[in-house]
Image (cartoon, rainbow, N blue to C red):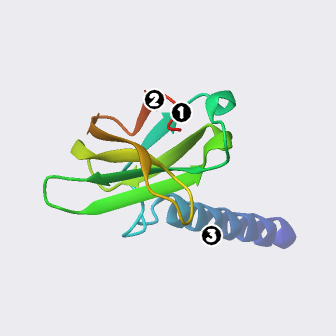
Amino acid sequence: MRAAVRMRSWLCALGCLSVVAFAGCIDAPLEGDAPFARLVAAWDPLACGDPHRVVIELGDEDGAAVSSSTPCNIGGLTVDVAHFGIYRGRIYAWVLGAAIRSEAAIEVTIDRPIVQWMVATPR
């Protein structure tokens, strides 16, 4: 009888400990610099031509700037942004030691956590 009571109290204590540990995991605060939203840009990687990088530079209304780049043949890239809003900037093709080319002004409205954007292949 005493063994059953002890076993029950151990199981109760283990259950309470598990609930507290699990609750601590799901109630953890977000990191301060975690992105709030993400712009996912995509293009046709077969239309890239000579090897180069594609760069997207964006700025919000407060002047905070973000940018990202990737080789063109990857076919897409993501830019993490801090908040919803209107972002203005540019997209262009770039090669080390050469002038920027295929530069275009852009304006993107980030109004949900993931915004997908199809662009013409920057060459």
**Crowdedness of circle 3 by 10 Å Cα count: few (<14), some, many (20+)?**
few
In contact (CB < 8 Å): disc 1 and disc 2? yes
Three-letter amino acid code at the position of disc 2: Val
Q: Quadrant of residue 29?
A: bottom left
Q: Is residue 27 above or below residue 106?
A: below
Q: Is residue 59 left or right of residue 18?
A: left
Three-letter amino acid code at the position of disc 3: Leu
Circle 1 sits on which residue? 42
Give residue 118's mark. none
Image location of residue 98, percent across then percent down:
51, 60
Give residue 119's mark. 2
- The answer to which of marks 2 and 3 sits earlier in the sequence is 3
Front residue (pair 40, 33): 40
**Crowdedness of circle 1 by 10 Å Cα count: few (<14), some, many (20+)?**
some
Q: Is residue 107 left or right of residue 27?
A: left
Residue at image point 66% right, 62% down:
15
Residue at image point 33% right, 35% down:
112
Circle 3 sits on which residue? 17
The nearer-to-camera label among 2 and 3 is 2
Determine whether the residue tagged by mark 3 lies in a helix, strand or loop: helix
Tell me the distance, in whole angstroms, between the alpha carbons under discs 1 and 2. 6 Å
Q: Is residue 58 left or right of residue 55?
A: left
In contact (CB < 8 Å): disc 3 and disc 1? no
